Amino acid sequence: MDNLNLSKFCIRLGDHCLIMAHRQSELCSNGPFLEEDIAQINLGLDLLGQAEALLIYAAKLEGGTRTADDLAFRRPERQFHNFMLTEQPNTDFAFVIVRQYIMSLYLLKTYQALSKVEDDTLSGIALKALKELTYHERHFAMWLKRLGDGTEESHERTQTAINELWMFVGELYEEDEIDFMAQKASYAPTGIEMKTFLMEHITAKFSEATLETPHSIYMTTGSKKGIHTEYLGYLLTEMQYLQRAYPDAKW
Amino acid sequence: MGAEELNVLFQERIDANDKIEPRDNMPEEYRKHLIRQMSQHAHSEVIGMQPEGNWITRAPSLRAKKILLAKVQDEAGHGLYLYSATETLGITRDELIEKLHQGKAKYASIFNYPALTWADMGAIGWLVDGAAITNQVSLQKTSYGPYARAMVKICKEESFHQRQGYEIIASMAAGTDEQKEMAQDALNRFWWPSLMMFGPHDSDSPRSGNAMKWKIKRESNDVLRKRFIDKTVSQVELIGLTVPDKDLKWNEKEQSYDFGAIDWDEFWAVIKGGGPCNIKRLKHHKKAHTDGEWVRKAAAAYAQKQAKN
Ligand SMILES: [Fe+2]
Ligand SMILES: [Fe+2]
């Protein structure tokens, strides 16, 4: 992969992490109990660290005209490439758990491939992230079981979250020319491999948690082209406020 | 042994600088005083997450966001640690939270002031954590073992927070005119409330007598406040900001600063619920607790099912 395309590849992955870190950080002081508050912040910090590392590298690959902060705080909505799933709001704790569980699987599979590439920077980022994601997946899977197989209310809330978020899962195994380039260089699994991995794990975990995997639901698409749900605009407005309001300031 | 003799023995241990441990005999008033003070401290850590949490999503750089998020996580950890230390006195966290929600337990009044600009993230770390450290370093020698050990652990992290806060303010003070203005404004708004964090003047501090006698409190409010002012003024001057106190003057004879009158009416008004954010902070905490109820119930139900299998 040439530098420019590899940079685009890193920006996509960095965007997933950055937007999820934002959603995780919104949970701060809103957790169901203090230990879980701390855990969620911790997971957010991991994702933020991954986003930072990936965007720093992407900026370097681009040629250094933009910094990682420029990428995070100065790009408009249509230039963000995070999956729509990542930007979905923390409607309730069940939405958080379902969203993050599915994304943890995606990141696990993605970092597994990246940890083996020859590019030392990327494999370094991936190896560190892989350890973090192993914990994330375990944490969210645990909650999935507690909520799915807990009380009637928690079961219902979690099934609702699954049903409402399911249309965003299709994007996780969609492919375009950047994906094909990445796959050719063994930087990423194929769409089929990703889909199989996701569906096997999700279906097994959902059924263990007495939850149903939806089927034949229309899958939405667009984030690879910078198309998003309406939520992203508000998220960026908040996230980018200081950099936009005081463009000459250094912090 | 009668209660009186036990109290004499207890005081002898205190005077010999023994640490009191959870299973040791202690006067009921000592226990009550500790529960009040330690739970107030724990609640402060947790409520303190709100004004700073308020800025995580708006932090101006990835680095700043990471540092702030990690700081707020530390504070949550302090809260957890202090709740556990308080539980050694024979009360549960649920009971402590219940008291907070009923308004029977307090938290540091400083968190009833709003965090309005990014410079406030600097001012809070620098001044609020700074004042807290001054107090907590002194509490490392407090007579109750679990509290003293909690303070040792917490102080290490607090000094990081203070440095990080100062770094934010310093870089803004050296930034654009707008940033400098924000930095001075944050200092203006947080200076006096930070001084109030040490509590009323010694002459107006009704509970200090016993607390000093039992060595829960090791140094008086006024001594600690002065120490904080003396070390902070030079930090203000170093970055070209101005302490918002026209009566501040170096006292050559005492080798310490004289400072202006604190607005105690404001202090008492905020403690009694009249601060700009008292209602908001408590509502927020209650809402998170209520919203989390179904989650806690689910976890309990799941654990019960697992135990049966
Ligand atoms: Fe703290
Ligand atoms: Fe702190």
Image (cartoon, coloured by chain):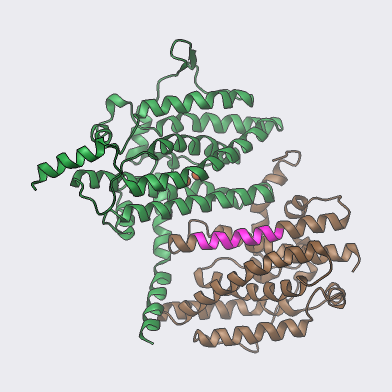
Chain colours: A brown, B green
In the rendered view of the protein, which quadrant contains the N terminus of chain A?
bottom right
Task: Note whether residue B57 is visible.
Answer: yes
| Residue B252, image x, y percentages | 48, 11
B229, above or below B43, in the image = above
- At x 65% / y 79%, what residue is drawn? A167
Q: Residue A99, relative to residue B116: is it above or below?
A: below
Q: Quadrant of the C terminus of chain A?
A: top right
Query: Can I make out residue A156 in this image?
Result: no
Relative depth, front residue between A64 and A236:
A64
| Front one among B206 and A112 | A112
In the orientation shown, which residue stands out farthest toward the right?
A: A2
Magenta stretch: dominant secondary structure: helix
Report the number of numbered marks: 0
First to last magenta residue range = A38-51
Magenta includes A244?
no
Image x and y of residue B301, in percent: 38, 78
Q: Where is residue A152 drawn, in percent x and y?
A: 41, 81
Question: Quick check: B180 left or right of B271?
Answer: right
Q: Quick one: A140 or B172, which is closer to the camera?
A: A140
Q: Position of residue B173 (x, y in %)?
A: 66, 30
Query: Is residue B111 found left or right of A42 in the rendered image?
Result: left
Q: Residue furthest top?
A: B253
Residue, x 50% and y 84% (percent of image)?
Answer: A209
